[in-house]
Amino acid sequence: MDMKVIPIQVAPPTKSPAWYQTTASEPRGFIQPHALDELWFHTGTACNLACPFCLEGSKPGDDRLQLLRFEDAKPFIDEALTLGVKQFSFTGGEPFVAKDMVRILDYALQYRPCMVLTNATEPLIKRLKQLQPLLQHANKLHFRVSLDHFDAAKHDIGRGAGMFDLALQGLRELHAMGFTVSVANQMLADSTPAETAIYFKKVFSNAGLPEDIHRVEFPDFHPPGLDVATPQISANCMISYQSEDSRRAFMCAFSKMVVKDKGRMRVYACTLVDDDPDYALAETLTASMAEPVSMKHHRCYSCFKYGASCSEM
């Protein structure tokens, strides 16, 4: 009897070839997610500032990633709770440009602690009274404020005149209200780490803040969309230079980020890779957890080399 041959329809690959192989045709290094401890939300690339070095390319009115609304965030908060999430974190842009930001925090804080990355300038300062009731939640709200340099003039080169003093004002008011705070800066080429620590302590003390405020330093992540030359991370690299414990400490092993891109909510592998569509893993958190994460992005090398992490958990 003749058998009719039915051609198999093979779906086109959803990732670029570079997701799987280095330019030397070696198997690419991957991270296998093991938990959803921290869920990040990108509140949108709109910002009140236009810093030329911004890793998100944020500026006033920018809509590369759209502003997060309460209706966008709630389903992911609810799903994350079923997956055992321990903290919700928010980045931008400037999160307080999003008009629903306080409402989103009020909902998320009913269930888990939250962290917000902010420049602590006008958008936040204008909403301090709205933030006050959030202190009543049993779960704590933490703010991490960006200070690019301990020198006001050097900070203001990128952020704008007066922004150093305004950020310190926001930081001081948050601390005085009872919120916990920390500071983030890039690694500075014009001072040693020890000198940087001393100078920042003086800045905090002079601003009426505790001089031992926790500070997080990051390498230069470069603006979005750049093709930055870094050593490529093969599967062999992940075995030879990383242990099982260190691989589990990569952010993409225990966290995800939700973004709004062209009006569509997507789950990305990491807070640092929203400029590469390969890292859009799924439309639900549950589905995203099954996806191994390629180490192909140039920012992955910062995690590989420095142990860089946006998390403060």
Image (cartoon, rainbow, N blue to C red):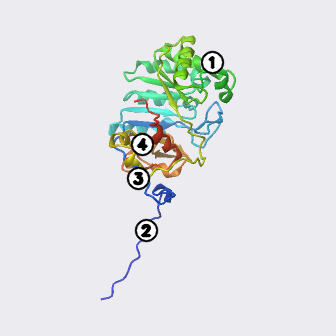
Give the spatial CA distance, label 4 vs label 2: 29 Å
Say whether residue 288 is visible. Answer: no
**Secondary structure of residue under mark 3:** helix
Foreground mark, 2 or 1? Answer: 1
- Residue 305 placed where, x, y %? 47, 40
Is there CB contact under 8 Å for labels 3 and 4? Answer: no
Q: Nearer the viewer, residue 149 or 136?
A: 149
Mark 1: give few (<14), some (14-19) or many (20+) Cα within 10 Å. some
Q: Which amino acid type is shown beneath numbered disc 1?
A: Asp
Tell me the tag on residue 235.
Answer: 3
Which badge, 4 or 2, comes first in the chain's sequence?
2
Mark 4: give few (<14), some (14-19) or many (20+) Cα within 10 Å. many
Which badge, 2 or 1, comes first in the chain's sequence?
2
Tell me the tag on residue 10.
Answer: 2
**Secondary structure of residue under mark 1:** helix
Question: For mark 4, what is the residue?
Answer: 252
Foreground mark, 3 or 4? Answer: 3
Q: Which amino acid type is shown beneath numbered disc 2?
A: Val
Question: For mark 1, what is the residue?
Answer: 165
